[in-house]
Image: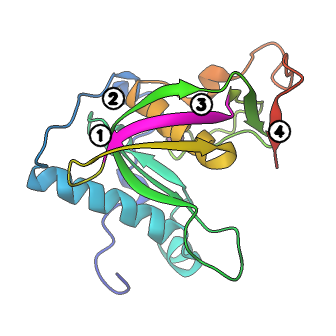
Amino acid sequence: MFGGTILFLMNDIVRDGDPVLRAVAKNVEFPLSDEDKKLAHDMMEYLENSQTPELSEKYGLRPGVGLAAPQVGVSEMMAAVLVPSNDENDDTPVFKEVIINPVIVSHSVQPTALSEGEGCLSVDKDVPGYVVRHDRITVRYQDMNGEKHQIRLRDYPAIVCQHEIDHLNGHLYYDLINKKEPFSLPDKNTVVID
Ligand code: NI
């Protein structure tokens, strides 16, 4: 990776206003084509590079924890997710996977929101406000080998996966912000995450 070709740069990231970000992506077929394998690899590599301070600075990469295929102009149900470790003694990521054909099969009633709102590599402006999501989700997806997984996520990794799955269905995070009262939380049981 170091010294090699950096595959996705900020110029490759599709920005808000491009219709690909509002389209419902199409399902991916298995076995993966060589193009899809490369896409999956390159998306994850963007996230890894963007979370490596010297590379993100050198190449001007906005740090990201998720990248969906429509964000690089490919309308397919595929997203890379890399939630880094929050344990200084263990750098194993909290969640790292290319999720393909993901579906949220069930979710908690209890909502959650990040205290500082969300951001998106495809949205250059900052849209303040709570992005209210489900605190716990069960996601079914396929990995790069086509193997099926069903996993339960909560709190921050659940938020990241919901943000990415939204991209695959043509939604952007600010769609979920209450326009009149961006920092109102109608459900007082909402888990607010710092
Ligand atoms: Ni995004």
Q: Which mark is residue 20?
A: 2
At mark 1, the secondary structure is loop
Name the quadrant containing residue 11. bottom left
Q: Which residue is mark 4?
A: 192
Q: Is residue 115 visible?
A: no
Which kind of residue does numbered mark 3 sit on? Tyr
The residue beneath circle 1 is: 73
| The furthest residue to the top | 180
Helix, strand or loop at disc 4? strand
Instruction: Please tell me whether the stretch drawn in magenta is mainly helix, strand or loop.
Output: strand
| Marks 2 and 3 in Cβ contact (< 8 Å) | no
Q: Residues within 10 Å of mark 2 (few under 14, many from 20)?
A: many
Residue type at tag 4: Val
Q: Earlier in the sequence, mark 1 or mark 4?
A: 1
Eye-nearest disc, 2 or 4:
4
Q: How many marks?
A: 4
Q: Earlier in the sequence, mark 3 or mark 4?
A: 3
Whether label 3 lies within 8 Å of ligand 1 gets the answer: yes
The residue labelled by disc 3 is 173
- Does 118 lie within the magenta span? no
- Which numbered disc flags the more N-terminal residue, 1 or 2? 2
Q: How far apart are the two marked residues, 3 and 4, measured between alpha carbons? A: 16 Å
The local crowd at label 1, few if under 14, some if 14 to 19, many if 20 or more residues have their Cα within 10 Å, is some
* In front of the other: 191 or 121: 191
- Image coords of residue 64 (percent x, y): 54, 56
**Nearest to viewer (mark 1 / mark 3):** 3
Amino acid type assigned to the residue bearing label 2 in the image: Val
Residue 33 shown left or right of residue 185 in the figure: left
Secondary structure at numbered mark 3: helix
Dot 2 or dot 3: first in sequence order is: 2
- Residue at 33% x, 22% y: name it: 24
- Tell me the kind of residue under disc 1: Gly
